[in-house]
Amino acid sequence: MKRKRYYNFKLDCFGASPLAMTPLRTVSLRAPSLVSLRAKRSNLVSSLRAGSCEAIPLLKFLYLNIALFIFLITLILFSNPQSAIAQDTLEKIKSSGEIVWGSDAEGGAPYIFPDPENPSRLIGFEVDLMDAIARELGIKQRQFQNSWDSLIPTLERGDIDIAINGIEITPARKEKVAFSNPYYIYTEQLVVRAKEERVKEASDLKGKKVGTLSGSAAQGILEGIGSVDIKIYSGQVEPYKDLSIGRLDAVLLDLPIAAYYAKPNPLLKFTGAPIGEGYYGIAMRKGDDRLKEEINKILERLFKSGEIKNIYEKWGLWNSSQERLISGFGIRDSGFKEPQFLPSESLRVLSFLPFLLKGALMTIIISVLSMILAVFLGLILVILRLYGSRILSILSTAYIEIYRGTPLLIQLYILYYGLPNIGITLNAFTAAVIGLGMNYAAYEAEIYRAGIEAIPKGQMEAALSLGMRRSLALQRIILPQAVKIAIPPVTNDFIALFKDSSLVSVIAMVELTKSYSILAVSSMKFFELGLITALLYFGMSYPLSLFARRLERRLKRGLS
Amino acid sequence: MIRITELHKYYSDFHLFKGLSIDVERGEVLVLIGPSGSGKSTFLRCINGLEIFQKGSILVDGGEIHGLAKERLSAFERDSIRKVRLKVGMVFQHFNLFPHKTALQNIIEAPVHVLGLDKKEAEERAMSLLKKVKLEGMKDMYPENLSGGEKQRVAIARALAMKPEAMLFDEPTSSLDPETVGEVLTIMKDLAGEGMTMVVATHEMKFAEDVADRAAVFDKGEIIETGIPEEIFKNPSKERTRAFLSRVLDR
Ligand SMILES: Nc1ncnc2c1ncn2[C@@H]1O[C@H](COP(=O)(O)OP(=O)(O)O)[C@@H](O)[C@H]1O
Ligand SMILES: [Mg+2]
């Protein structure tokens, strides 16, 4: 299982399908950074208009930044996360009387999720399991919320004692953390539309569009089949939603997810035998051997007493595979075969580069196309707003205010997941370009407006007095001057758009940020890959920002 | 050639013109004098359709603008205003040259794009006008590199390039350095000598006396008297004119 969240708002507007009844998908938003970004941009526009953009001593500024960067890197490299946790965790939890377990309630059912009847309460089979384990330990349990991707780093940091959240036991993860014996054997379940005839098993998937979650075991299996058109999603609801409206031919995901989200949907059906097999384990810090031993004993007791079986049956998760966990197969340490779907040797970081570069290329393509759309649509919007008939002017103003006043993420969601409800089904790429482009068009329109309003009224009057029509005066006299003023802030917006383009990963686009998170989650190399990804972004935006600065300087000279 | 009848102009609640009427004959040079804020600029801007007015009509050589109370005009109204603008050229106090175009490009802009002249013909016309305003050497200069007097002369040439039948000047020398005022007035005097119909708002009393056929004295949105400039200056019939003149002539 793999769930990824960027944003922090609840979304339950997916119409009346059974999927919409499931607990809210929740995502978490970097609102502050977006807000400050917009603020910076509008400052830029106004300071430009005032002609007061002081030239920053460039070199000094650069040195300062480099120094700060080196300082931070050193800090990160030399701070040993283990040093924070001197105590043995078992002792610590016994003396504090509480075990803190990390999981992501935003990920969804049936693992851990807000109770639909009482959303402030968390339920799920892992909550039940944790209750039982804590009881056996004779202490209380407390859930610690964090995004799923970050659970293992959080564990390493020492914020939590253990992590339980459908974390597959993989070689890469085992390099970072210790795992308990498996507590669940999962398989991958193929789901197709109820009327589907062509796809009966995994081998039929060649050339088909198949949805899965990023970084999941299922993704590995699909890649293994070859020539499958894999669509990567961030949440469990959307792939099934897209499958039911025909954007996908099939979805391959962990059985617990399929059981909860797809099985109740009459438009969908299970097909083929369960594929692959893997194990969920409880993650602990390396070196916590006593805790691991204790938890393994408790798991053994709970399996033998049948309590775990009861829990799994309650959630519809029990199947014959799990019998092997009772019969002692899982209880003997490491008596099971390693899952084969993820890189079994730790790959060198550079070997990830081609994948990241592919993501970067997608980022560039999406950014460039949506910027082109934004530049032209923004121009149309501002002309309608300033010079159109009253109705067009009101409509254009409303467009600008609505797009600036709502989060880009919601706009993307509505465009991609909402429009199919009224019969408009865009593919992910189109939705990404249109979504970003339409959002940025509102900002570009405002930049143009600032530019146009910075042109003295006398210019338009002189043009009119020479007998020009307003449209000709705009085209020949006003816009050429306004564009000059607008170019630097528009270029700055383009840089911002490069970074905002990472948001489109929520509609199943794999661009640079998504590529990073896919690789980082499966390889556990958050730090190294993070640096490379940051460098790639920097490499794309820095030339643009130099370009913007040059233009700004030239413009200032031109206006004096 | 220009007939203003019963002009009423409001700036929101402020009733500036309360029924102004005046005729300008073909070939006549009319100067508008009066204290600042008395309505001279507004009057000129109404004639050129840059300012809406609420009642009355302005007739320019057959073209006509009627009282228009609304902000957004219909296509028909815009078109009739444009017809008037094609007959009268306008020169502004602050020149309003197009900063992204050279002197020559400023002048040929409208002839090419409004009248549809081909570029060559427009350039020939522009060059002869630049010669007339004594700036033929400056054709490739951008406005930012011209002095105030030079800018205003280019602006005059730009308006003349449309071959207007009348010219409106709104304080054409008020934002100039004193030493460049003369070169602009000389051009205007030449123009008057060629028989151009001109309406000039100005504080240059000497120019008014030497060049104008008639002066109209504005005060608080009214024309309080009209007459031959020389006579008005010597012997104003209204106390308000006398007060204004003593302030200006004292300087
Ligand atoms: N855009 C405007 N809005 C409101 N009042 C204005 C506007 N333009 C001019 N006025 C007023 O109209 C009067 C006449 O102004 P104006 O025509 O500029 O006079 P003049 O050119 O003789 O100095 C003044 O009282 C001025 O305050
Ligand atoms: Mg004035």
Image (spheres, grey):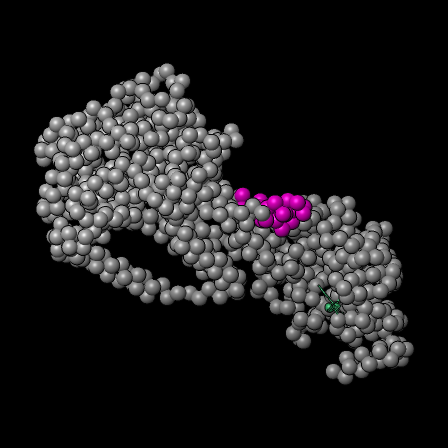
Q: Which range is magenta?
A: A377-397
Chief secondary structure of the magenta portion: helix
Q: Assess whether residue A388 is covered by the magenta stretch.
A: yes
Q: Quadrant of ligand 1?
A: bottom right
Q: Where residue A510 sits: x, y (%)?
A: 34, 37
Single out the residue that lies furthest toward the bottom. Answer: B250
Residue under the point 55% across and 50% down: A401
Q: Residue at x 58, y 44 (%)?
A: A380
| Residue at the spot 52% in from the left edge and 53% down from the top edge | A447
Q: On the rendered image, what quadrant is the N terminus of chain B found in? A: bottom right
Residue A83, quarter of the rendered image: bottom left
Image x and y of residue B187, in percent: 73, 66
Describe residue B112's horizontal placement relative to residue A224 as left or right. right
Q: Residue furthest top?
A: A197
- Look at the image and tell me in which quarter the C terminus of chain B lies: bottom right
A143 is higher (above) or lower (below) than B31: above
Q: Nearer the viewer, residue B186 or A139?
A: A139
